[in-house]
Amino acid sequence: MPAPEMHVKPAVGGFADYYRMADEQSRSRALGYSNNAAAPSAPAVAVEEQTGTSYDDLAEDTYAFESSSPTPPPPEPLRQKLVGAWKLESYVAYPTPESPVQRPTYPMTRNVTGYIMYTPDGYMSAQMLIPGQQSFKRGEGEEPQWAEAGKRFFAYSGPYYINDEGRGREETLRHTFQVCNLPGWIGDIQIRTHKFEDDGQVLVLGSEEPTEIKYSNGDEHEITQKAYHHLPHLGSV
């Protein structure tokens, strides 16, 4: 009994070998050779192994992501910008639509001088003075002189608070009046609008609500605004 014929499927070593083998079989059939007849051997063809794309050879600059505008640094916290001493440059009151006089006024004259100071640990102090009063020493002044001195001076101090209202929203600045030469304002908490100019060297503070200001010809409700210039650090004395 003849032994059964064994057919062994040739192993496929790779895509290049497989395509070359199929090409040789087609060529044999075209020349009239049977499956069992050996076809003349063709000279070996060198097949270059395909290794794929080498990404190391690509220009890195072509694929590097370049942002057209650099990411801006995070904004400086308000407390950090406030800390220090500021010299008063102007104190102006702007009329509300209901005010009888529609022009800016100067509640403590154009010559007012003063300071406002913020400490890193959360305290502030503000003073304003109308200069020009005749000088007198403690214990020498009469009652009218002391009354005039009180009208020419305004001061208050206490803790200040900064509330962060969330991303993209302006921080809220609040002044507390724990000490004030106006007795009716002691205990108040007032919001101050704020903005910085001249690269942070000028601080402009404003009242959020209209303030009643008494003039000789009547009372007016106005929005007050004060501009301060930042003072340099004097160092240790």
Image: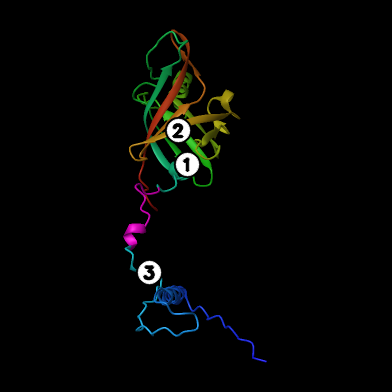
- The residue positioned 46% from the left and 21% from the top of the image is 223
Q: Nearer the viewer, mark 1 or mark 3?
A: 3
Amino acid on which the number 1 mark rests in the picture? Leu
Mark toward the start of the polypeptide (1 vs 2): 1
Q: Are marks 1 and 2 in contact (CB under 8 Å)?
A: yes
Q: Secondary structure at mark 3?
A: loop
Mark toward the start of the polypeptide (3 vs 2): 3
The residue range painted magenta reads 60-71
The magenta stretch spans residue 49: no
Q: Nearer the viewer, mark 3 or mark 2?
A: 3
Q: Nearer the viewer, residue 39 or 160?
A: 39
Position of 59 relative to 184 (above/below): below
Label 3 packing within 10 angstroms: few (<14), some (14-19), many (20+) = few
Label 1 packing within 10 angstroms: few (<14), some (14-19), many (20+) = some
Disc ID at residue 166:
none
Disc ID at residue 78:
1
Separation (CA) of disc 1 from disc 3: 52 Å
- The residue positioned 53% from the left and 80% from the top of the image is 11
Amino acid on which the number 2 mark rests in the picture? His
Q: Nearer the viewer, residue 69 or 154?
A: 69
Residue highlighted by disc 2: 194
- The residue positioned 42% from the left and 34% from the top of the image is 195
Position of 162 relative to 17 (above/below): above
Q: Nearer the viewer, residue 99 or 123?
A: 99
Residue 7 percent location from the top left of the image = 58, 83
Separation (CA) of disc 3 from disc 2: 58 Å
Question: In this view, which residue lies farthest toward the right?
Answer: 1
Residue highlighted by disc 3: 54
Amino acid on which the number 3 mark rests in the picture? Ser
Residue 15 percent location from the top left of the image = 46, 73
Q: Secondary structure at mark 1?
A: helix
